[in-house]
Structures are given as C-alpha cells and as structure tokens.
Image: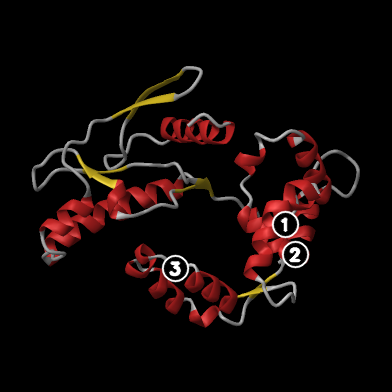
Amino acid sequence: MTTPISIEDVRREVKILKALSNHNNLVKFYDACEDALNVYVVMELCEGGELLERILSRGGRYSEEDAKAIVIQILSVITFCHLQGVLHRDLKPENFLFTTRDENAQMKLIDFGLFDFVKLGSLQIFDALSKALTEDQLFYLRSQFKLLAPNGEGHISFDNFRMVLLQNATEAMKESKVIDILNVLEPLSYRKIDFEEFCAAAISPHHLEALDGWEQMTSTAFEHFEWEGNQAITVKELAQVLTILS
C-alpha cells in the first residue's frame, strides 16, 4: 500500500469513519496514524465473525424472525449513512461483522474503502472533469472504451458489456452472480453510453487529486459551469448546465 492513490484511499476512509459516528451498527473508529510506508487504523474489535459465516453455518437458512433482526440492522445503518450523504458501495455479507459469538450479538458495518458522497448533479461534475483531462490522462480510459465498443460506432451497448464479460469469464465469475445481474439488467439493453459518459462514470476525483495538474483540471471544470465571468457559480448557471446535459 505504498502508491499515492492507495494511501489516499485509506486516508479518505479514515476521514469518513471519523465523520460517521454514533450508530450502533457502524464499526467504531478510535484512531489512525501513518509512517513513511503505511497508514494504521485502530477500530473496534469484532470477534463474532462475518455475517457470511453465520449464513453458511445455517446452510443458508434463516427463520423469518432471525432474518428480520438482521435486515433491520442492515437497513438501519445504511439509512443512517445515506442521510449523511454517504454511499458505502460495497455491501455484502463479508462486510458485516458481529461483536461477539453470541447469537444475539450486534452487527457492525465495516470497510468504507469504496465509499462515495451523494452529490447533486455528480455525473455532470465528473461530464466536466473528464473534459479537463489531457489525451495522455485519457489514454487508459480510451483503451478500455475501445475494448467494450468493438464495432467502432462510438457507443457502448448492453450487449457489448455482456460479450466482453462472457469472453473474459473466469471460473470464479461463472460461480458468482455476475450472469444473474446481467439478466436482471436486460430491460436497459436499449441504452447506449458514449465516451464522455463512460469517462464520467469511470473516473474518481479522489484519484485525480493525486495527479499533477489537479488544480488546473478543477479550474477547467469550474469554468464549464461558470458562464458569467464573476468567479461564482449561480443557481441559474448550475440549473442551465444540468438541464442541457440531462
């Protein structure tokens, strides 16, 4: 974990753990420190194992009452996060730990490494950052886009995603729910994504912060919204941009 991006990811996770507190189903954060190579995070000890382990130990079967107790805790902590404007983005049984081995032990949500904030017009803010990137910085994204759009039409379709995933499927993927998820998304097969939309969905502003020229990128993105030359984005300007790009 020595790259600037990976270290920044952990710093972000520490910040969000500091900000999110006072919920019984959220793992407690105590302190963090770092040296030249690593970031160390001290959090609540949860000795009861993962929710996944308990599900498997029961053969995947829960009584309605036991399932209710689990679901209530999950919905409670997720609602709390959403009300703070935070998306966890990695919800799975492995990221819920029990404090003790007791059957009635409290459950705790962990691992905010992929979290993000809910932002009004976030796609457009990202539809602006991607335009500020240089061709060199877009090289990797453009290569990925070409892999997903082999027909050269300039758009990625649902069928493109399905074909690439199936062509590169591993045994682990075949045993996962990826194929089921693709089938569920079938009603969206008429939608297509152009390169700008692909960049907006793929880039992370938190990773861009580690690049040289970040201030210039944000300045260019700011100018995309600020039209009147008064160095401030008005509600009217923001509404116009969001209307045009929606």
Q: Relative to 170, does residue 217 appear above or below in the rendering?
A: above
Q: Which residue is mark 2?
A: 245
Q: What amino acid type should be assigned to the residue bearing mark 1?
A: Asp
Residue for point 50% across, 72% down? 167
Q: What amino acid type should be assigned to the residue bearing mark 3?
A: Ala
Q: CA distance from mark 3 to mark 1?
A: 30 Å
Q: Which residue is mark 3?
A: 169
Q: Where is residue 211, by image quadrant?
A: top right
Residue farthest toward the right in the current orientation of the protein: 229
Q: Quadrant of the C terminus?
A: bottom right
On residue 155, which mark appears? none
Circle 2/circle 1 CB separation < 8 Å: yes
Residue for point 12% across, 62% down? 65
Residue for point 77% across, 47% down? 136
| Label 2: element kind | helix
> Where does residue 234 sit, x and y in percent of width and height?
79, 47
Position of 15 with respect to 21 (left or right) is right
Residue 122 seen in render? yes
Q: Relative to 72, does residue 148 appear above or below in the rendering?
A: below
